[in-house]
Image (spheres, rainbow, N blue to C red):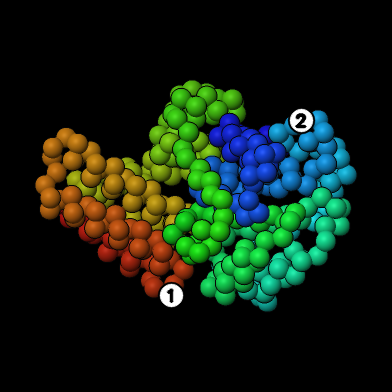
Amino acid sequence: MTLAPWQSSVLERSVQALAEGRLGHAQLLVGPPTLGTLETARALGEMLLCTGASEQGLSQACGRCKSCLLLAAGSHPDWHEITFEDNPQGKKRSEITVDQLRALRDKLQLSAQLGVAVVAVIHPADAMNHSAANTLLKTLEEPQPGRYLLLVADSLSRLSATIRSRCQRTEFRLPTSVASLQWLQEQGVDAARAGSALQAARGNPGLALEWLQDEEILPLREQVRTTLQALAVGKGKPEETAAKWADSSQLPMILEFAADYALEQQRAAIANGEATVKSATTIADWFDRANQTRKLLSTTVRKDLMIYELLLRWSSL
């Protein structure tokens, strides 16, 4: 596994802590998925199970020992990954359930079959329901030697304080713009496109690369901005735009881009001294409404009517 520099630094610190006996049995990695929190957790888990890395002085799994080969084949008996399961209708659940955590608790009580360690990766850990979180808490309160829990979460606020307090926490921060641009160019992106995508992704290099690899995302973002600019000066019809957006399979991302654009406009107006308290508050309110609309897309509310109301408000700002 090839890790980005900011991921490698996290792994190296963890490996150093392991060598010095400071690595706790529960690790919590927090940050946007596009920064590679899950990939780093998996790399750490592989390292904990590897039998060749320490012998060779490596900071990553060797890739050649029996443990690494079993991991590559997806058949390592001491590796457990907990994430969303399918429900009886064959669709992915939106939460991690108590049954999953109870099954994991039972597995952690067994001896390591390869005699090294037992590793469990839970992602996203902040999607556990209340009962699942309580079951995990009991497991965290009764640590056993050679058992490692690696929790990956997007948001700390959705994890209980008691769970957070029982984990060693690593929060992923955005790399510097210089480091991000260098990394994007190392991925084969030319400097101009890398800079533009990084700005669009608000400094997140992983997200920028993801958008660059999908040829539709960045053009869609520009299209949303152009549409809102036109509506703001009385061009275009909110009802036509609402109908078009409502029919798009990219609607959640459209609304996210719309909210981002509103926030940019507010910040620019404040920086230029053009915003009054009233206008800044009005745009902030629209930003909140756009995000709330995105959250309601999975409900039975009429999408086209919600979006039409949202765009009418934008036209009147």
The mark found on residue 151 in the picture is none
The reply to whether residue 311 is in sight is: no
At a point 61% along the width and 65% down the height, the residue shown is 141
Q: Residues within 10 Å of mark 2 (few under 14, many from 20)?
A: few
Percent position (x, y) of residue 13? 61, 37
Query: Left or right: where does residue 90 sit relative to residue 137?
Result: right
Q: Are marks 1 and 2 in contact (CB under 8 Å)?
A: no
SS for callout 2: loop
Query: Left or right: where does residue 86 sit relative to residue 206?
Result: right
At a point 19% along the width and 36% down the height, the residue shown is 271
Q: Nearer the viewer, residue 217 or 127?
A: 127
Q: Nearer the viewer, residue 248 or 193?
A: 193
The reply to whether residue 139 is in sight is: yes
Q: Nearer the viewer, residue 19 or 263?
A: 19
Percent position (x, y) of residue 117? 78, 52
At a point 19% along the width and 55% down the height, the residue shown is 282
Query: Left or right: where does residue 175 sit relative to residue 287?
Result: right
At a point 44% along the width and 57% down the height, the residue shown is 252
Disc 1/disc 2 C-alpha distance (Å): 57 Å
Image quarter of the N terminus: top right
Depicted 267 relative to depicted 118: above or below:
above
Q: How many numbered circles does the render carry? A: 2
SS for callout 1: loop
What's the residue type where badge 2 is placed? Gly
Q: Nearer the viewer, residue 101 or 270?
A: 101
Q: In terms of sequence position, does the residue under pointer 1 or pointer 2 come before the other? A: 2
Percent position (x, y) of residue 308? 30, 62
Depicted 80 relative to depicted 261: above or below:
below
What's the residue type where badge 1 is placed? Thr
Name the residue carrying label 1: 300
Name the residue carrying label 2: 57
Percent position (x, y) of residue 121? 67, 55
